[in-house]
Image (spheres, rainbow, N blue to C red):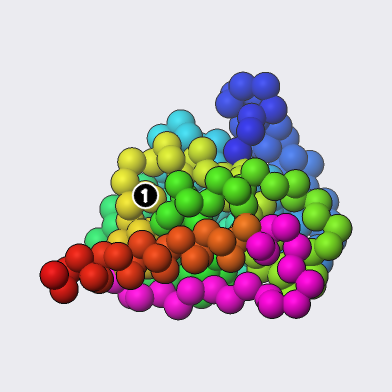
Amino acid sequence: MKPVKEDGDAERWFRMCLELGGECGRLEGVPCVCERARIGLAATLLEKQEFTEARQVLLAAARVDGTESVELLWTTALAVYAEEGGDSIISKGALETAALKNSFVAYILAYVELFDGVLSLDQEDSRLKSSEKALSMAVAYCVKELRVWKGVEGSLEWVLHFVEEKALKMPVVVESDKSAMAHEMEVSLGMILERRHQETCHTME
């Protein structure tokens, strides 16, 4: 997540938004202003290694704002991992819930080095179809919060282990009228399949 000026400024800005409160309008599956402020505050706290408070902020978002957005579920999974480690039932459950919401995020985080083409694209792709919104949300989340994930030691490896251990079903890219984003995602997923094939062949030798 990009700071406003410094992390301290970002934290103050997010806290100010929450203090002002007010009624939040929202679209289905999209965080309202208050939820965005809580997620932003939690991400800032995670970067500062203040894991317990970050988790409390996210719990408040789930309780008060009453939504289960991609951003909320995936940032919650990171916060739980940061505080409890990857082996607890709670952290595993949080990751499974997030992956069920959007498995594109799981694959991007697990194989992030293969997704440079996807993450570098313009997020306002006018050709993006409504059926590709899950992909768009995943890319937007990872572009915004990848730095936070990289800052929590072992978190990306944790997601990779989950994807491979659970044999998480690879997300499907829409076949008709592919946007540039969808095309790049398909290329990256193809590289993962090729890597898995090579690993299988190596194991059988």
Query: Residue at label 1?
Result: 155
Give the percent coordinates (x, y) of residue 98. Answer: 50, 67
Is there any visible trace of residue 91 in the rendered image?
A: no
- Residue drawn 48% across the image and 74% down it: 170
The span picked out in magenta is: 165-183
Is there any visible trace of residue 151 in the rendered image?
A: yes
Q: Is 171 placed left or right of 94 in the picture? A: right
Give the percent coordinates (x, y) of residue 161. Answer: 30, 62
Look at the image and tell me in which quarter the C terminus lies: bottom left
Looking at numbered disc 1 in the image, what kind of residue is underneath it?
A: Ser
Foreground of the two, 85 or 59: 85
Please check the rendered image and state whether residue 174 is part of the magenta-colored stretch, yes or no: yes
Q: What main secondary structure does the magenta stretch of the protein show? A: loop
- Residue drawn 39% across the image and 41% down it: 152
Give the percent coordinates (x, y) of residue 133. Answer: 72, 67
Residue 115 vertical placement versus 147 (above, below): below
Look at the image and tell me in which quarter the N terminus lies: top right
Q: Secondary structure beneath disc 1?
A: helix
Residue 175 vertical placement versus 127 (above, below): below
- Residue drawn 55% across the image and 46% down it: 116
